[in-house]
Image (cartoon, rainbow, N blue to C red):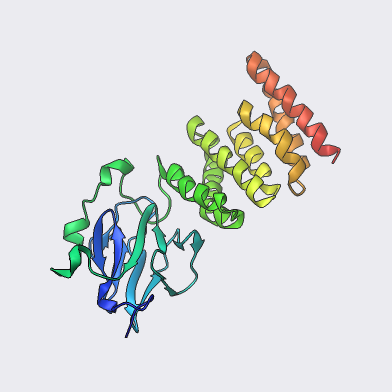
Amino acid sequence: MAAAGGHDPSAAWLDYRGHALELRDAPLVMGRSTACQLVLDDALVSRRHAQVRLIQGVPTVEDLGSVNGVHVNGSRITGPTPLRPGDRVLVGNEELVLRTGPRPGGGEKPMQRYTAETLSGVDPARFGMERAEEGTRKGDSLDLLGGVADKVLALGRGDEAERILATYLNTLLATARSKGTLDAEQAEKAVKYAMKLAVGTGKGSWIDYCVALYAAARRTLPGPVVDELYTVLRNVTEINVAQLREYVALLRGLAGSMGPAERFLLQRLEGLERLASAR
């Protein structure tokens, strides 16, 4: 039976970093586990993340219950999804493109069906990360998740970006609250993406997130975030004014140990509180 696009199903393959991964009736499973046919050493990929196979000759991708999902042309799939030539499948940060038609190289020799052994070492160093348990990881995890979220936000899919980032961001907040401390660089990245989600979704709850995170760490929000809040506040749903007021009161109590720059930010936050209260 013909594959999508009317080609012989034996000539359907995934283009991955210049490799032609032949599709057959048996699934090509992708994930971090070395038991997969395609091993992806990526912090966003689950051990058994997704599979692609021919179903009645049609190339079809399926999410195997991964943490971060599978996206086709920027949209997260919710079940087995037929693919058409040129469709772009995103698994973690790895992109695969469906190709059909004449075999690469003119069909003089069969395409290779790559195994875990042949692809398990594909350029893992560029990720600069450690293997860990399922879900998000420390270090570069937010950069990786954020990269995917940025692509989705560029397509105007704020709710989808929220689903990608929410678990990580909320876990970070819970950790900050339990420990009362937070890495400065990690916190700045977190509120940067929370602000993007506020803009992309129109939800004031992501402004509340920024306030809660820095209240837990007992620090002033970064200057660029405070400046942006004045603009974003006007374009989101209602925020938690009481929480903002408590945060400002907390900072006033710490003002004696602040430098000039922090005291200026405190004044800016007091102005933001007044603006939020007047909405």
Extreme residue in the front direction: 106
Q: Quadrant of residue 114?
A: bottom left
Q: Quadrant of residue 265?
A: top right
Could you say where residue 81 lies in the image, as x and y percent from the top left? 44, 73
Query: Does the rendering let one see residue 111?
Result: no
Q: Name above or below for residue 124 compared with residue 15.
A: above
Extreme residue in the left direction: 109
Left or right: where does residue 190 sit relative to residue 110?
A: right
Could you say where residue 15 lies in the image, as x and y percent from the top left? 30, 60
Q: Between residues 55 and 215, which one lies in front from this camera angle?
A: 55
Q: Between residues 82 and 191, which one lies in front from this camera angle?
A: 82
Left or right: where does residue 25 sit relative to residue 64?
A: left
Q: Name above or below for residue 29 compared with residue 241.
A: below
Q: Residue at x 81, y 34 (%)?
A: 275
Q: Residue at x 27, y 46 (%)?
A: 124
Number of residue marks: 0
Left or right: where does residue 28 sit relative to residue 180?
A: left
Query: Does the rendering let one see residue 104?
Result: yes
Q: Name above or below for residue 86 compared with residue 200.
A: below
Q: Residue at x 47, y 50 (%)?
A: 148
